Amino acid sequence: MTISHISRRKFLGLAGVSAGGLILGVSVPGISVAQKGNAAFTPSAFIHIAESGDTVIYCGRCEMGQGISTALPAAVADELEADWGRVTVRQGDGDEKYGPQETGGSASIHLMFIPMREAGAAAREMLVAAAAAVWGLPISQCYGENHIVKNKNNDKTLGYGELASKAAELPIPEKPALKVKKDYRYIGKGLPRHNQGDIVQGKLTYGIDTKMPGLRYAAIRHCPVLGGKMISADKKEALAMKGVIDVIEIPRFNVPYGSLGGVAVVADNTWTAEQALKKIKIEWDLGENKIYDTQKYKAQLVNNVEKPARLAAERGDVKGAFEKAEILYSATYTGGHLCHAPMEPNASVVWVQDNSCEVWASTQSPVDIQKVLGQYLEREPKDIVVHVQMAGGAFGRKFKCDYVHEAAVISQKIKAPVQLTWSREEDMRTGYYHSINAQHIKASIDKDGHVTGWLHRAAFPAIASLFDPSLDRAPADSLNTIKDHPFGIVNLRSESGEAKAHTRIGWYRAVYAIFYGFAFGTFADELAHKAGKDTYTFLNTIYDNNKDPKQAEKVQRSKGVLALAKEKSGWDKRDTLPKNQGVGIAVHYCFRSYVAMVVHVEVNDGDITVLNVDCAIDCGQILNPDGATAQMEGAVVMAMSLAMHTEIVFRDGAVVNSNYHDYPVLRINDMPKVRVHMVDSDIKPTGLGEPGLGPFPAALSNAVFAASGKRYRDLPFKS
C-alpha cells in the first residue's frame, strides 16, 4: 500500500456535534475531509466524546489478534489525555471514511500513528480552549489531564463531557502540539487490550459466531485442481436428507478473489450441510494443472536457478569479481508451499436483498469485499455494507474474499441470510498458498575474507500471477529484496528463473521475507565458515563494506539489532555448550524493520529441540511492549512450524494435506523460551507483525549446523 506525506490541514476535520458531543475525524490521502456543522459526516477515523464524558474511539483497521484495536486507539487516548477506563473502542465497518482499511503488510501503525495522534491532540486542544473560554482565561492557563481540563490558577476543573458541545463549535487547531516521549501515559506502556476480559471469559464474538433470525447454513466443495471445472453432480441423496434446503452450483467468478466455482449445500445447520455435501457425486474435468506435482516442480525450480536466468538487477562486475576470487562458493536453498491454517476457518454471513447487501465477515480487507460483491451484484461498492468482525487468525488469507462472494451467490438464490463456513479441509486444499521457491547464490571472497561478488537467482511463482496468469516467472520487482539488501557488496547480479503458477499464490505472513531471509542468513553463515570467521564478525564486516550513504541507516540499525541479540543471548559463550548443542545467528531487514535472532538448539540422533530464542527488534517507536513481545513470540511459533513441520504437497494437481494431523503446526510442549529485546527508539513506528519470521529459519539452520555439523537448505527441514 502507498504511504504518502500529507499536510495536517488536509487530514484533520471537524464534524460538528452529535447528540451534544464532539466528533473529530482524521483523513488520509484520497479520502475527503469531514465538514464542520450539520453536513454529512465522512471522516476516515473519529473520536466521539458524549456530554456524559464517555468516549468512543473507532478503529478502522481490522483486529485479528495482533492488538491493533488497542494500540491505535490508545495512541489517540494518550494525546487526548483521556481516561482509558472511560474509553470504548469500536470496530469500524467497511467504509472509506476510515481510510485504507486493508490490514496487512505490517503497515497499520506505520501509516496511522501520526494522524491518529494528531486527532487526539486536536481534540484535547479544543477541549482546553473551550474551558479557557468558560473561565475567561488565556488558553495557556489551562491544560487537559485524565479526562478533565484543569485551571492552573486554582483548583477548578471541567470534565470533558461538560466541554464537548462547546468544543465542537471551535475551529480546528492548525498545528496541534504532540506530546514528547517522557509525557506518554499509554504509548510505549504495557496497556492491557481493551477486550481482554471478553477474550479470557470466552465472550468475544468472532466472524464465525454471527447469528440472526432466519439464518441458513451452507458448506461448499470446489474443484481440487486450479482451473478445473465440474462436469456433473448427482444431488439426489443430498437433497433427500432431512434439513437440506437446496444444492446450488456456484460458477467461477473470474475476478481477483472471486470464487473458483463449486457446489454448495444449504441446510438448517452446518453439520447437516457438511454431511449432505459428502453425498454429492461430483465428476470434475481437472484441466491442465492436473500434472502439478510439488516434488517434481521443486526439482525443476532448482534446475532453473542453477543455470543462467532472466536479469532482474545488476551493479558492478560480478564476472570480474568471480575471476579474481580467492574463494568461490555456492549453495541452493528451497522451500515448499505453505497455507495459512488460521484457527478460525473461512466464514461469513451475507444477506442479499433487492435493495441492499449486508455482510458480516472476519476480513483483512472490507474494501475488496465491496469491490467483488459490487461487481457480482452490479451495484456500487459503497452500497455493500460490511460489518468487520474479530478474526480468529488470518495471516493474509482473509485479504481474499472468495468465501464472502460465494455466500452472496447462495443468499441471492435462496432469498435469505446465509452463513457459509469452509471446512478446514476445504481451506487447506483449495485456498491460497505461499510460494514454493528455489534460490541459488554464488559468492566470491578475496584473500582478506571480504565478499566481493554475489550472484543470486530466485525462482518462485509470484503473487502477481493472481492478476496475470500468463506470468512464467516472478517479475523483477519481486526480487528487489536482493538488490536492496544492506549487505555491502559492490558487484551484484540478481536473476529470475522460470516458475509458472499451478495454484493460487497469495500473501502469507512475512511473504517473500521467509525465503529471502532463509537464503541470506544461511548463506552468510556458510560463507563465514568458509572464510574461517565467526558469523557475527563476518556479518558486521559485510555491513561495514556498505559505503552507500543512502543505506547508512539500514546498516547501522541492522548492526544494532545484531549487537543486541549477541549481548542478550550469550553468543560469546557458545564454545562452552555441550557437544550436541549449538547456537545460530541471523538478521534480516523487511517491512521497514530490523530483527536479529540467536537460536539455541540441542540435536540428539537427528531430533532437533529448540531451547531458547533471543530476538532483538528495531521497529522504531513501540506503542505497546506487551503487544510487541506477543508478535515476536507468535512469529517464532509460525517460523518454527514452517521450518520444521509444515509444507503443502501437491500430487496430480491436488493438495494432499487436509488438516492439522498432516500439516502439523507447533504444539505448546515444543515451544522454546523466547526472550524479546527491543531497541528504544524515537523513530516513527515501522512493521512489527511480520518481520519476526524473516531471520528465524536461518538462525535455526545455523544453530543445527553448529550442534551437529548437518546443514539444512530446504524448508521444512528433512532428514
Image (cartoon, rainbow, N blue to C red):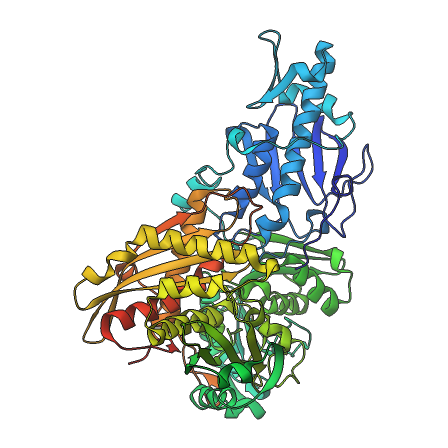
Q: In which quarter of the image is residue 295?
A: bottom left
Question: With 705 as the anchor, is 525 left or right in this view?
Answer: right
The answer to whether 686 is drawn above or below residue 665 in the figure is above
The answer to whether 95 is drawn above or below residue 707 in the figure is above
Q: Residue at x 39, y 72 (%)?
A: 522
| Front one among 34 and 618 | 618
Quarter of the picture containing the C terminus is: bottom left
Question: With 569 as the anchor, is 17 left or right in this view?
Answer: right
Question: With 405 as the anchor, is 514 left or right in this view?
Answer: left
| Front one among 13 and 457 | 457
For the question of whether residue 78 can be seen, the reply is: yes
Q: In which quarter of the image is residue 716?
A: bottom left
The answer to whether 160 is drawn above or below residue 398 in the figure is above
Residue 409: where, in percent of width, then height? Answer: 65, 69
Residue 247: where, in percent of width, then height? Answer: 57, 76
| Front one among 530 and 320 | 320
For the question of whether residue 240 can be seen, the reply is: no
Q: Residue lying furthest top in this view?
A: 154
The answer to whether 358 is drawn above or below residue 202 in the figure is below
Residue 105: where, in percent of width, then height? Answer: 57, 59
Residue 646: where, in percent of width, then height? Answer: 38, 73
